Image: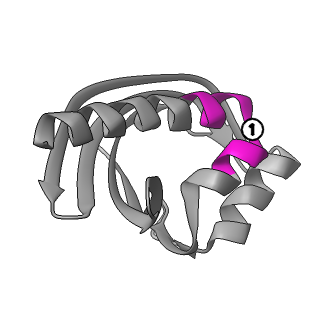
Amino acid sequence: MIEIIEAQITEIEERLRQAMLTSDVRVLNELLAPDIIIISHRGELLKKQDDLAAHESGAFQFHDLNPSERQIQICGEVAIVSVRMQIVGSYQGSAANGDFRFTRVWAHTEPEIWQIVAAHISQVA
């Protein structure tokens, strides 16, 4: 069972990566839980609407998202993902290139629907 969940999470993580690259707000809206807690790489506390608005407005612009060092931990109906990501892009007009680590908590918010309920991003020194 754990292998099946890990495969699902790996697939949905790729769907998230593609949506981030293309600022596909429709897909991002599906993947982010309504009450998601997001801590940005600047330490800002963001909500779902903040993230979606940043993609809609072009504040987030990703040209490349290259994942590595992905770890998935399954805890019942929750999956915790840690992934290192080489990013080429910008945030609010400033370069946001570099090496970042993302932690995402995925939960079944409805049967068979995984959504991110919490996310944290930090730059790797």
Colouring scheme applied when the structure was drawn: one colour
Which residues fall within the magenta stretch?
A: 18-28
Q: Is the stretch drawn in magenta largely helix, strand or loop?
A: helix
In-front residue for pair 92/109: 109
Residue at 48%, 58% in the rendered image: 115
Is 77 in front, or is 53?
A: 77
Residue 93 visible in the shown view: no
Give how far across and how far down residue 50 sits, in percent.
70, 67
Question: Residue 97: x percent and y percent?
Answer: 52, 31
Residue 93 in picture, x, y percent from top left: 76, 44
Q: Is residue 79 above or below residue 76?
A: above
Mark 1: which secondary structure?
loop
Name the residue at 57% across, 60% down: 32
Is there any visible trace of residue 15 in the rendered image? yes
Quadrant where the C terminus is found in the figure: top left
Residue where numbered disc 1 is placed: 24
Q: Nearer the viewer, residue 33 or 47?
A: 33
Q: Residue 105: name its quadrant.
A: bottom left
* Residue 116 lies in quadrant: bottom left
The residue drawn where x is 76% and y is 46% is 26
Q: In the picture provided, is 58 more to the left or to the right than 111?
A: right
Query: Magenta span has 24?
Result: yes
Q: Which residue lies at the image location 64% right of the left edge and 53% below the top edge?
A: 30
